[in-house]
Amino acid sequence: MFRYLTAAFLGIIMVTACADDDPAYSPKPRMYPRVEYPAHAYEWVEKPDCGFKFRKLASSTIESKERFFNEEIDSECWFNLVYPDFDATVYYTYYPIDNRKTYSSLVKESFRMAYEHSKMATSIQEEPLLGDRQNHVGMSFDLKGPVASPYQFFLSDTTNHFIRGSLYFNTRPNPDSLRPVLAYVREDLDTLIQSFTWY
C-alpha cells in the first residue's frame, strides 16, 4: 500500500513539474536609465589672467586643475568643466603661443591626440570652427564609436592664445546609451565655442 502511495505521489509531482502553465521566457529589451536634462541656462566665466571668457551651462561647474600627470601646474588657465548631472568632464589645457609652443606645433599636437583614438573610432569627423571675429579659429573632432573621448576641439587667435578641450564620460563607452547625453552636451559646447572671446 505504501509503495502505491509513493508511486502516485511521485507521478503527481512529475505531472505538475512537466505542466506547461508558465508562459515562455523571453528576454526583456535592453533599456537605459532615464536622464533628467537641466534647462539650457548659461552664465559667463571670465579668466582675465588667462585672456579669455566664455559662456557655460549654469548647472556645470569649473574645477581648478593643479596637477597634470603628477606635475604641478602653475597656471589657473588649465581647468575642468564638470557636468555632474551626466558624470562627464571637459578637460581644458591652455598655452600661450611663443617660440617654444608655436601655433603650428600646438595644432599638430591636437590632431595627434584626437587621432590617438582612431583604433576604437569608427570614424573621426573634422569641422573647422570660425567665430564671429577673424582671430577666432579652431577645429572640432567628432569621434564615432566606443571611444573614451567622443568630442574634442581647439580654439586659437593664432598669435597669442591656444586652448584645447576634450570631453570624457566617467563610464564605459557605449555610443547608443550616450548618444542623447552627448547631443545635449554638444549643444552646450557649441554655445561655449561661439561665445569664446579673447581679451
Image (cartoon, rainbow, N blue to C red):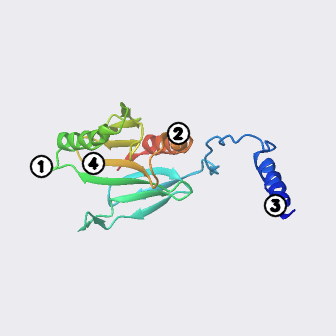
Residue 87's disc is: none
Task: Rate crowding at label 2 as few (under 14), some (14 to 19) or many (20 or more) other CA atoms within 10 Å.
Answer: few
Looking at the image, residue 166 sits to the left or right of residue 161; the answer is right
Q: Label 3 vs label 4: CA separation? A: 94 Å
Indicate the amino acid at tag 2: Asp
Residue 3's disc is: 3
Which residue has dot 2 on it?
A: 176
Label pair 3/4, CB-CB below 8 angstroms = no
Indicate the amino acid at tag 1: Asn
Which residue has dot 4 on it?
A: 161
Q: Secondary structure at mark 3?
A: helix
* Foreground tag (2 vs 1): 2
Q: Position of residue 188 (x, y in %)?
A: 51, 45
- Earlier sequence position, callout 3 versus callout 2: 3
Q: Label 3 vs label 2: CA separation? A: 62 Å
- Earlier sequence position, callout 3 versus callout 4: 3
Task: Rate crowding at label 4 as few (under 14), some (14 to 19) or many (20 or more) other CA atoms within 10 Å.
Answer: many
Q: Secondary structure at mark 2?
A: helix
Q: Label 2 vs label 1: CA separation? A: 44 Å
Indicate the amino acid at tag 4: His
Q: Residue at x 33, y 43 (%)?
A: 154
- Earlier sequence position, callout 2 versus callout 1: 1
Label pair 1/4, CB-CB below 8 angstroms = no
Q: Position of residue 157 (x, y in %)?
A: 29, 42
Q: Secondary structure at mark 1?
A: loop
Q: Label 1 vs label 4: CA separation? A: 13 Å
